[in-house]
Structure formats: C-alpha cells, structure tokens
C-alpha cells in the first residue's frame, strides 16, 4: 500500500533506529555491565582536537580521568594518558543477534584510557554504552508489544465485526471492560500478580506480553468499525454472490481495508508502549539490574545528589524525546494519508 | 422485442408468495416489522426481460438480494430453472445460485478499488477454483465482449468512467455463464448517451447468450425501451401483474396503486 | 431519561466486571500470597483467624470473591496486610488526595486548552499556529517521567517550589488557612507536570474538532449570512464541536489518571499512586484490587458524567428514537 513520501522517509528512519539498536554491541564501545570502581560518576570525556603542542588534529583525543583530588568524585585529566580515538577498533567481544560473535567496535580508545561520551554511572559503567544497549530493550519492547496488541486486536475486531451476533456482543463487552480501566493501573495490577524478581530475559518477554495484551481494546474497536462498514460494500456482496467462503471474504476484501488503520495505530501505540516499559522499569517493576533499560537508568536520578550533580545521568530521559518525535511525525503523516486514501 | 417472437417461452424464474420482513428496534424495545416484500408473485420467461418498477423503498433491492441468495426470505418459494431454491443446500445450491448474477447500481462500490480490472473480472473464477492461466484468458475475453480493450486490464476502478465501470461489472457477471442476470438500477447516474450504449450492450449480450434479465428501476423511461414485460411494485406488493410496457403510465400508476392499497 | 438510566446500569455492570477481572488476576498469580501472609510475624493469630473467616482464605476463588463482595457491602473493601487494617479508610483518604490533584489538573488543562485550541483553529496560518504546533509536538514527545524529574530539579535548584510531598512538617500546627496555602503550594509542582503532560493531546483534539465544525456547511452558511465571527465561534461552531469533545472526555480522563500515577510517585504526592506501588512491592493483594477498583470507579464515573453532559448538550441524543 502506498503511504506517501513523507511517511516513507520516516518509516526508513524508524527502521534505521531499530537496526542500529540491533547492532548495539558494535556501536557501544564497552559492555553494559562492565564496572570500573575507579571511575564512579565520572563526567563525560572531553574530546581534544588540539594536542599538547597546540596542533589541530581531525582525530580527537581523550584523556584518562583519575581521582587526584581529595574531594570524592572530582576527577582530573591525566595528561600522560591521552590517546587518540580510533574507528573500528578491537575491543571486548560481544554477540550480534545472540549468534555471531565479534569484537569490532565502531569507535574506541586504547586502554587504559576510556572514552565515556556520556560519563559513567554509580558503578563506573559507561553510560553511553548502556544507553545504546538500553535502546534494544526499550525500542523493541515497544515494537513487539505493538505487534501483539495489533494481532490480538485485529483478530478479535475482524471476527466481531464480520460475524456479529453474540460474538460481537461478547467482544464489545470485553472491550468496554478493558477500556474502563486506566491503562497504567491495569498494567500495574497485572504486573503486581506476577513474580517480582525474575531474570531480565524473562521480564522482557513478560513485559511485552502484558503491555501488548492490555492494549488490544482500542485497535480492536477501530478495526471492528472498519469491518462493519466494509462488509456491506458492493464488491463484498458480489463476492458472496459468487459463492465466496467467509474466510476468502475476510482475507481478500476486508483485511486490506484494515491496513491503513493498523499502520496508523501502530505508529500511535509504539511510543505509548515504549513509555510503558520505561515507566515500569523506572519504578522497579520492569527490567532490573544489571540489564540496562532507559527506565531503570533513569531511576537513579531520584537520588538527590545524582539529580543535582551528575547531569549526564539524565541522558535516557532526553534520548526518548527525538524517538517520540519521529513516531509522532510518522503518526500524523499516516493519519493525513489515511484521510485521503480510499 | 415483443413476446410473440420467442418460440420457446418457458419460465426460467418463478416467484410465488415471497415474503420478507425487516424488524426494527433493539431487543428491549418494542419491535415492529417493516414488510419489505409482501406476497410477491413473478414470472420471467427465458430469454426475455422483465422490468420491475417502483419507487424507492418499495422493496426492489430486497427482492434482488433474496433471488441471489444474499437474504433468506421469510416465506414463499423461488423456483429457478425448474428447481426450488429453498430445498437445496450446500454445494448444489451454490452451483445453482451462481447462475443468477446481480449487477449493482453503484458501480464504484461494486468494484474493489484496490484490485485491477482483470483481477476484478476474474474473481468469480478465483472463488470457483479455476486455474490461473485459464481464468486470465477468460477474463480478458469477457472484457473484450463488453467493449473494454484488454490493454486496460491493469487499470483500477477509479481510472475508469462510470459507464466503463458498469461494463466491467457486466463482464464479471458474465464469467460464470449465468442464465438470469438481475440489473439493479444499472443505468442510474449515467449520461443519456452512455445509457444508450449500455442498453445496447445488454441487448446484444442477451441475444448472444440467451440471457434472461430482471431489470429493477424506479424510472420506467430507463427500462421501457428494452423490457418485454413490466411489473410494478409498491410497498412490497406487485400491483397488476405483468404487463406490456406501453400499458404503463407511471404517474397514474402510482395513484392507482395508492388507491388500491388504501381500498384493500 | 431512560437513556441515562441505561448508561448508569451499564456502568455498574462494568464495575462488577472489573472486580471480577481483578480477582482473576489474583488467581493467575504464581505462588501463594496466602502462605506469605501466614509466615508474616506481624500479623497476629487472631487477625489470621478473622481473615480466614471473613475472607475465606483457604477457600476457592469464587468463595473468596463472594467474601470480598460482602466486605464491600460492609464498607471495608478487603483487608490490608501491610497496614493491618481494612482497606476502605486507607483508600478513601488517598483517593481524596488523588482527586484533588486530578480534578484541578483537568480543570486547568481544559481552561487553557479550550481557548488555545479555538484560537489556533480560527487562525490556521501565521506564526502563532506554527509556534503552537511546534510547542505541542515538543511537549507530546517529552515523556512525563522527564517532565516530573525536571520539575523536581527546578524545585530543588530554585527553592521556589517544595520538592515533593503534600505538606511541610511545620504546617501541622498552623491555622487552617495557612495549611490550605501550604497544600496549595505543594500542589503546584505535580499540577504543572500533569497539565503539561495532558495539554498537547487536548489542544490538538480541540483544534481538530473546531476545524471540523468551522468547515461544516452550517457554519459556512452562517458566515455567508454575515454573522459576526465571534458569534459564529461561540454560538455555532463550539456547540457543534462539543459532541466529539465530550466523548473525548472519558478517554482523556483515563490517560490523566494513568499519568497522575507516575507523577504522584515521582513527586511524592501521597495519593493512590504511591499507595498502589507500595502495595505491589509488599504483595498486599486487597489493597491492589481496591485501588484498581477505585481508579476504575473514577474513570467510569467520569465517562458517565460525560454522557450526562452529552445528553444535556446534544439534542440529537435526547430525541433519538428508532423510526
């Protein structure tokens, strides 16, 4: 189906975002769980384009931070240990898609110097790396939960709209029920009754399942509406006259009518679901340590000294803004398109 | 063409006592019925054209839907090609129903805007399970028959004019080789010259394939030209049986029916 | 009137359905919280015995549900293991606080969003409209977590707003008026965050509804008759737009309640939000069910209120009769 130039570029952007999230191991210079007790809450590395002799280089250098002063947390650069930043370096090994191992990273610096573009957190872990790994979790939980919601919602919506009768009445009542609860409360309630401390992998799957299943109601209602009006169209009646089976009608004629609704709903739901995962992790109900989620990275800000002094820890809160912006633009582009399309 | 020219005149369609009522109102409210069809009797002879004329809401479209099998009548029987439709089930009924085709008034609504012309025309064969090469050939042949060049096979409905869309619908209806074609207000909304073209096309197809037509219209002028007989339907009832087109004077007819209805 | 009565009945049935749903989730929970309760040394054996008798602890789910319904009728709404008291009084005090926040947020955001939406619908070009759509887009893209934390930072840094909580410690002994002022200034922070969070969608919807109304044939006819612009806006377009907007009300209330949950937790506003979170971490089952029911009550009540408004505002609904 045609979505228009604007929507297509935005879709490509979204796809690029997700693909780079998949290559988190490559983009992030360090492992997300690697601690460094010497560099707790260290500020981001300064990139020096001018070396000690005053010459300008295209390739920036980074200096190692050392805890010289008596005041805890005050780091000074060690001028002896300034090394240039290199591209495509060898670093710690990681796995792509959990299958291929590699140890090439996009950029890095030779040890013992560390390049910390966004500083380090309370355990000395590189915030930039954690941010990149965290994107995998947060972005994909949104995407997968959306897929689940839409699958479930579309199935029930089409069945209810097409068959009508008691099935429709039943689905509508369930729909009303799910819409009668504020979604975050419902999410919390469901999460409450599941084990609180389980492995990050399991939590990820659990979160997707819960977030996805909570949100089936709105798309289901919209799709049911489309099917209700769609099944009375002339060509559907004509196909029935040719002896088409119910399944054929739903697959060939009704399902394509839902595509634009599905796509628009997808663009609207994904940011909500990403936010749901971030909120749950922020409050300790989602992904836990040491797995990085933008949510649980943000939760450390609730401590007074972190909030005041370590501005780089705010990064997860701000990286969401451009992501949501893109999805927003995508949503309105698709919506505008849907209003004019057939 | 007057009736006298047809040598073998036997009824391809007989409708006896057909009744259909729509109920309105939700289950907790007082329900009342609207009688869409009230004891309809019709006869259509093979190879001829019966026009069914009546004002909007008289029950014409309901009758068409019952004949094609899209609606179940409450009472009465439909005898098509000598077989009682009500008695048949499943595969037999489906096969027989394929021989009755319905062409809608709204050509744009009757064609899936996402499908190409060829795909639209060959759809009946897709549903019937024909092989893809054969059905494409037959579809293109049907398009040529109705005067649409096969080069247009990839065009979408919105790229065609109203008259061309109607031709496409006719081509599609012909594909299953029907015996009875119900034309539901097919000329409405088309310019006069296009109406003439479509009427001529329908007449040609009728003599070529020995089709029987049931033309539904609210305007006698549309169908008066090529109908052999006319039946007037008013508030679900047929008034006065089959008559020759010349005998119908529409405005008088409405007054007559109203008086008849009121008088009992 | 029968229409309203029907809607009321539907709402009650809905709430019952919600309670059943919540109970089903309890059943789906792996691990038996009852064992945890039994092991908890803080709960006396008498309490345990009373719990077993009143809430049917050892009985199957259906029996427990009936017991819970009885406790609702008694006005108790279940028993909190963490607080060692019936749920209802705890819930009511917290619910009032949430209502204060949510209610004022709703009032203020509609007060701001209505004129904003109407003005941008009128003047569809120019710097005001593009500026406003940029601002709304930015606000929409900012997660409420970031906004809430940002406001906390602002409060700490500038010392103008209290950094969370509802009352200062010193306020307890002061006069009534000073106490109210104290609460009000504590309310400002969470209120601001909630308003900022809900403004963008509200403004967009109002703008869209007004544009639809302004471009409708009846308004165009009114303009052709030469009726003054302001009169058209207020007497023709706005009533026409009010139908979709009132329907929006229920939707908006749901998202407001969800947003308030997070804001309350982050800014330590002692409403239903932190209460629910505590209960989840403490596996205090009846509190969880009670809180969810309450939130649902707010939402369903709000939707019913919306239906009443719609009934009053839209004559088509009043005279809807099937032919």
Image: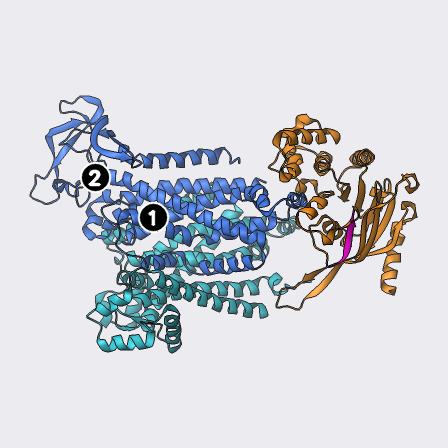
Chain colours: A blue, B orange, C cyan
Circle number at residue A126: 2
Q: Which residues are magenta?
A: B74-80
Tell me what residue is drawn at x 22 percent, y 37 percent.
A31
Circle number at residue A205: 1
Question: Tag 1's secondary structure?
Answer: helix
Q: Is residue B79 left or right of residue A185?
A: right
Circle number at residue C50: none
Tag 2, which chain? A
Residue B198 among magenta residues:
no
Give the dominant element type of the magenta stretch: helix, strand or loop. strand
Q: Position of residue A222 (x, y in %)?
A: 52, 50
Q: Residues within 10 Å of mark 2 (few under 14, many from 20)?
A: many
Front-most of C271 and B235? B235
Q: Position of residue C71 (x, y in %)?
A: 37, 75
Q: Is residue A28 left or right of residue A238?
A: left
Tell me what residue is drawn at x 48 percent, y 39 percent.
A333
> Label 1 vs label 2: CA separation?
26 Å
Q: Position of residue C7 (x, y in %)?
A: 53, 67
């Amino acid at each position: 189906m045609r979505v228009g130039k604007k929507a297509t570029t935005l879709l490509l952007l979204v796809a690029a975002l997700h693909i780079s999230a998949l290559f988190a191991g490559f983009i992030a210079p360090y492992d997300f769980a690697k601690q460094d007790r010497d560099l707790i809450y260290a500020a981001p590395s300064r990139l020096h384009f001018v070396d000690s002799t005053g010459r300008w280089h295209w390739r920036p250098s980074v200096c190692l931070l050392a805890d010289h002063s008596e005041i805890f947390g005050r780091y000074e650069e060690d001028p002896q240990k300034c090394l240039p930043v290199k591209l495509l370096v060898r670093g710690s090994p990681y796995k792509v898609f959990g299958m291929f191992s590699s140890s090439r990273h996009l950029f890095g610096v030779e040890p013992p110097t560390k390049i910390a573009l966004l500083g380090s957190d309370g355990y000395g872990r590189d915030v930039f790396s954690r941010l990149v790994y965290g994107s995998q979790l947060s972005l994909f939980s949104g995407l997968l939960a959306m897929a689940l919601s839409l699958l479930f919602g579309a199935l029930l919506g089409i069945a209810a709209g097409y068959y009508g009768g008691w099935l429709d009445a039943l689905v509508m009542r369930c729909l009303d029920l799910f819409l009668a609860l504020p979604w975050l409360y419902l999410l919390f309630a469901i999460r409450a009754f599941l084990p609180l401390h389980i492995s990050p992998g399991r939590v990820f799957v659990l979160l997707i399942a819960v977030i996805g299943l909570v949100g089936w109601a709105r798309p289901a209602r919209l799709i049911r509406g489309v099917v209700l009006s769609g099944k009375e169209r002339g060509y559907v009646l004509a196909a029935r006259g040719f002896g088409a089976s119910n399944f054929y009608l739903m697959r060939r004629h009704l399902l394509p009518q839902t595509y634009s609704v599905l796509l628009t709903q997808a663009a609207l739901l994904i940011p909500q679901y990403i936010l749901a995962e971030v909120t749950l992790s922020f409050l300790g109900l989602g992904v836990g340590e040491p797995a990085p989620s933008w949510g649980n990275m943000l939760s450390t800000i609730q401590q007074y000294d972190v909030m005041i002094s370590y501005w780089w820890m705010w990064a997860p809160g701000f990286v969401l803004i451009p992501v949501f912006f893109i999805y927003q633009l995508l949503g309105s582009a698709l919506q505008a398109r849907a209003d004019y399309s057939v | 063409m007057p009736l006298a020219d047809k040598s073998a005149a036997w009824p391809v369609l007989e409708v006896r006592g057909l009744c259909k009522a729509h109920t309105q109102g939700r289950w907790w409210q007082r329900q009342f019925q609207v009688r869409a069809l009230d004891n309809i009797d019709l006869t259509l002879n093979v190879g001829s054209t019966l026009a069914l004329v009546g004002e909007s809401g008289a029950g014409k479209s309901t009758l068409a839907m019952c004949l094609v099998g899209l609606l179940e009548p409450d009472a009465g029987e439909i005898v098509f090609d000598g077989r009682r439709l009500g008695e048949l089930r499943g595969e037999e009924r489906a096969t027989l129903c394929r021989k009755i085709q319905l062409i809608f008034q709204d050509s744009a609504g009757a064609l899936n805007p996402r499908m190409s012309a060829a795909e639209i025309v060959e759809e009946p064969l897709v549903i019937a399970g024909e092989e893809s090469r054969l059905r494409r050939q037959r579809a293109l042949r049907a398009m040529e028959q109705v005067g649409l060049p096969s080069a247009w096979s990839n065009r979408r409905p919105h790229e065609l004019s109203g008259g061309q869309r109607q031709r496409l619908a006719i081509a599609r209806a012909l594909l299953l080789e029907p015996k009875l074609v119900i034309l539901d207000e097919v000329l409405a909304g088309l310019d006069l010259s296009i109406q003439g073209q479509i009427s001529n096309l329908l007449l040609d197809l009728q003599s070529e394939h020995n089709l029987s037509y049931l033309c539904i219209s609210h305007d006698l002028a549309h169908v008066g030209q090529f109908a052999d007989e006319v039946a007037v339907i008013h508030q679900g009832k047929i008034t006065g049986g089959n008559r020759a087109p010349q005998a119908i004077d529409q405005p008088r007819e409405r007054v007559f029916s109203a008086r008849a209805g009121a008088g009992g | 009137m029968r229409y309203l009565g029907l809607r009321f009945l539907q709402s009650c049935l809905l709430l019952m359905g919600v309670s059943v749903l919540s109970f089903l989730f309890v059943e789906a929970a792996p691990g038996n919280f009852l064992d945890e309760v039994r092991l908890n040394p803080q709960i006396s054996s008498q309490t345990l015995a009373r719990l077993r008798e009143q809430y049917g602890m050892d009985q199957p789910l259906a029996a427990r549900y009936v017991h819970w319904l009885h406790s609702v009728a008694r006005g108790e709404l279940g028993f909190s293991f963490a607080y060692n008291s019936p749920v209802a009084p705890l819930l009511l005090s917290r619910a009032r606080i949430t209502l204060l926040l949510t209610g004022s947020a709703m009032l203020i955001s509609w007060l701001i969003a209505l004129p904003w939406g109407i003005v941008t619908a009128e003047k569809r070009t120019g710097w005001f409209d593009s500026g406003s759509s940029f601002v709304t887009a930015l606000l929409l893209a900012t997660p409420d977590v970031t906004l809430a934390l940002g406001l906390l930072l602002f409060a700490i840094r500038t010392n103008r707003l209290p950094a969370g909580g509802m009352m200062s410690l010193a306020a307890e002994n002061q006069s009534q008026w000073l106490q109210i002022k104290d609460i009000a200034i504590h309310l400002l922070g969470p209120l601001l965050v909630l308003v900022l969070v809900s403004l963008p969608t509200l403004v967009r919807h109002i703008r869209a509804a007004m544009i639809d109304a302004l471009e409708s044939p009846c308004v165009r006819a009114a303009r052709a008759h030469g009726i003054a612009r302001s009169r058209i806006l207020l007497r023709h377009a706005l009533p026409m737009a009010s139908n979709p907007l009132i329907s929006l009300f229920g939707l908006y209330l749901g998202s407001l309640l969800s947003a308030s949950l997070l804001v309350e937790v982050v800014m330590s506003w002692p409403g239903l939000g932190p209460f629910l979170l505590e209960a989840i971490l403490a596996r205090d089952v009846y509190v969880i069910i009670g809180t969810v029911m309450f939130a649902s009550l707010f939402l369903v009540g709000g939707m019913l209120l919306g239906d009443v408004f719609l009934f009053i505002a839209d004559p088509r609904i009043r005279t809807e009769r099937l032919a």
